[in-house]
Image (cartoon, rainbow, N blue to C red):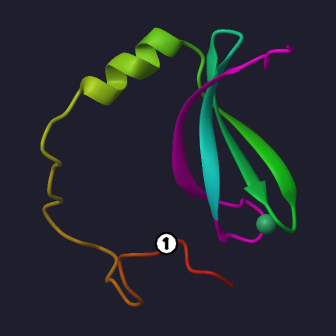
Amino acid sequence: MPTRNYLFYALTNSVCSQCLIKVEAKIIFQDGCVYLVKHCPTHGREEVLIADDIEYYKQSLEFIKPGDMPLRFNTPIKIGEDFCPTRK
Ligand SMILES: [Zn+2]
């Protein structure tokens, strides 16, 4: 049986860089690198390099610290926090 040339790691959500709709995305390991692979029904497959070192990427997921609060919020929230960027 043929095998894929990448290792599936996780499923997540992202947005299409063309139309900004929310799309499912796979995080895969391939050739020592970590990629986000998105699929938009209109614009097709898009692959984004997110790390060039798999171990570094895995370690970064374990680094958890409480988020910093800005001293002053410059941009008011107008439309809502749950979906960004806004679909055009
Ligand atoms: Zn699209």
What residue is at 15 percent from the left and 36 percent from the top? 65
What residue is at 54 percent from the left and 12 percent from the top? 53
Q: Is residue 68 left or right of residue 87?
A: left
- Quadrant containing ligand 1: bottom right
What residue is at 19 percent from the left and 33 percent from the top? 64
Q: Secondary structure at mark 1?
A: loop
What residue is at 56 percent from the left and 80 percent from the top? 86
Q: Which residue is mark 1?
A: 84
Q: Quadrant of residue 26?
A: top right
Q: Position of residue 21 (x, y in %)?
A: 67, 72
The range drawn in magenta is 1-22
Above or below 59: residue 75: below
**Mark 1 Cα shell of 10 Å, populated few (<14), some (14-19), many (≥20):** few
Count numbered badges in the picture. Answer: 1
The amino acid type, in three-letter code, at marker 1 is Cys
Q: Quadrant of residue 76?
A: bottom left
Q: Quadrant of residue 87?
A: bottom right
Q: Position of residue 85 (x, y in %)?
A: 54, 72
Which is nearer the eye, 20 or 37?
Answer: 37
31 in the magenta segment = no
Q: Is residue 36 left or right of residue 2?
A: left
Rendered-image quadrant of the C terminus = bottom right
Q: Which residue lies most toward the bottom here?
A: 78
Q: Position of residue 17 (x, y in %)?
A: 72, 59
Q: Which residue lies most toward the front here?
A: 1
Above or below 48: residue 41: below
Which is nearer the eye, 20 or 73?
Answer: 20
Q: Position of residue 75 (x, y in %)?
A: 34, 77
Above or below 36: residue 39: below
